Amino acid sequence: MKSNVRGRIRLISYAIVVFAVLLVGRLYYVQIVHGETYAEQADHQYVRPSTELFDRGSIFFEDKDGRLIAAATVKSGFTITINPTKIIDPPELYRTLSAVTPISEASFLLRAGKKDDPYEEIAKQISEEEAKKIEALNEPGVSIYKERWRFYPGNALGAQTVGFVGYDESGIHQAGQYGLERFYERTLSRETSNLYVNFFAEVFSGISNALSEDGAEAGNLVTTIEPSVQLFLERELKAIQNEWNSEKTGGIIIDPRTGEIYALGIAPSFNLNDFKSENGSAIFVNPLIESVYEMGSIIKPLTMAAGLDTGAVTATTTYHDKGFLELDGKKISNFDGKGRGVVSMQEVLNQSLNTGVAFVVTRIGSKQFAEYFRNYGLGEETGIDLPNEVHGLVDNLNSPRDVEYATASFGQGIAMTPIETVRALSALANGGVLVTPHVVKEIRYENGLSKTITYNDGKRVLKPETGQEITRMLVTVVDKALAGGTVKLPHYSVAAKTGTAQIAKEGERGYYDDRYLHSFFGYFPAYDPRFLVFLYTVEPKGVNFASQTLTNPFIDTVKFLINYYDLPPDR
């Protein structure tokens, strides 16, 4: 009998302890984890019970030392409203209010004249200091409401990558429209109604307050974007754009071993805090992910690597270059139409000879060459965590005509997105493996937990020794051929290649004679690369070759990264 009583007491004691732990946990969750949110709700009840205060998860850049820098956050301020039915002297009230905060006189008088309307907004997003001054005026018909809105501290920094928040099709709810804001909408969005889940129902049903209504976990994003690197890249892109009056200029800096993206940018860009643009909504689109281009000669290393990997050629293999060749009734020429006689595969890359990589295709065979290009991921999406990704156009790799494979070997007749191109080129740098390019590295949930985003190792597309040999050949290009060897870095090995592609005519066959896409890629330290840099510019004016437009910006970027990350010399 006594043992039964002791058992019941022990059971009740355990229940009390469990309940106490749950209660303490809940108090911590409410006061610490969601303290700010509940404070906003309380504030909200007093200032404007008819509407909900905006809330959304944050997006962070992370600098090289691990410090988080806000890229997208929520900012608080106040809205000033008037009740025209209670205003006696609108001009005098305007003078009083405009002395505290800027207000459009014409707009104010128009709104104040609506005598049948009890609510008109006259100023938004004003500071707390201004709100207190207006409150102290105690003017009849003037009200102050607290508001919160999406704010981007970097303004234009990483604009196409970050994206922005706008009203959805209903015109009622705000949602991510572009970039990370859209791709991670379910993680970033907040539903304030979730804050009122019954405590006991939550405890006994296992419902987590970190879940939004559609079941996605609410959290903040920590990205791989390094803000100083992003800022440097954007300045370089803008300088290229301005110097050559290009239609568009873009760039990507990635770790070719992991797929982590340090920076990606486009010029022209826009201010995330001001969506107005004379270019229209097209400027919000990210062409690094959503547009395809014929990339030109930066594709030649992929062709050469396929030849090395199959054993069809070596760096010392030679062929006789007449300056042109004819296939299927079509003539393919070198960029200058000149022949070099007997040249090696190394010289094919040094001098960027179209006939040379076409020769490599004949040694590999069209079918196997096409298989290598598909294995590089050309013609498919990369899986990057940004919206609206498209895949490349590589139908020419299915052609029965030899000429299509020859032109593909030097980057014409097939088109890829920049990010798709970067993934393929990263396989040359990292020893032959496809990586998944990505921008977000961690999600930090509101419940205090976090998740590191991991990606499985990609498939191997080249032998490790092939990666070493193509790297050695590309280092030779920089040391001896690029700008006549004048940009060689004595203490650092850099592997790189330029590309100049003709732009296809719109709506008809053939190419423009005076419109080009210039591209440039390189990686370093070449034999254990930390960075791969890709640059391109569309239709630069008054210049023909990428070596003229992009060599100096590339080398400047390399030097910046070496100094910023304090990379040790590798030779």
Image: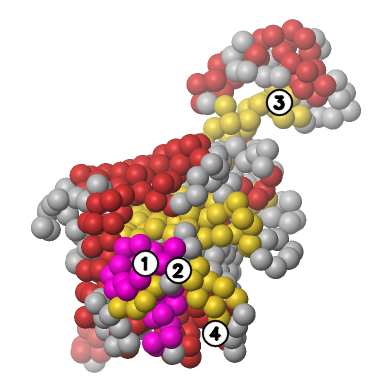
Task: For mark 1, give the secondary structure.
Answer: loop
Say what amino acid the circle numbered 1 marks. Answer: Arg
For label 4, the residue is 402
**Residue 415 numbered mark, or none:** none
For label 3, the residue is 122
Q: Is the magenta stretch mostly helix, strand or loop?
A: helix
On screen, residue 561 versus residue 542, left or right, reads left
Residue 547 percent coordinates (x, y) = 39, 51
Q: How far apart are marks 2 and 3 (CA)?
A: 71 Å
For label 1, the residue is 340
Q: Name which quarter of the figure residue 22 lies in.
A: bottom left
On screen, residue 6 versus residue 307, left or right, reads left
Q: Distance between the residues labelled 4 and 2?
A: 18 Å
On screen, residue 252 versus residue 92, left or right, reads left
Q: Are marks 1 and 2 in contact (CB under 8 Å)?
A: yes
Q: Do the residues labelled 1 and 4 touch (CB within 8 Å)?
A: no
Q: Name which quarter of the figure residue 304 lies in.
A: bottom left
Residue 424 percent coordinates (x, y) = 40, 72
- Quick check: is 450 in the magenta stretch? no
Q: How far apart are marks 3 and 4 (CA)?
A: 68 Å
Asked whether 259 or 106 is in front, the reply is 259
Task: For mark 4, give the secondary structure.
Answer: helix
For the N terminus, give its image quadrant: bottom left
Looking at the image, is mark 4 or mark 2 earlier in the sequence? 2
Residue located at (54% from left, 20% from top): 130
Asked whether 327 or 421 is in front, the reply is 327
The stretch in magenta equals 338-364
Q: Do the residues labelled 2 and 3 touch (CB within 8 Å)?
A: no
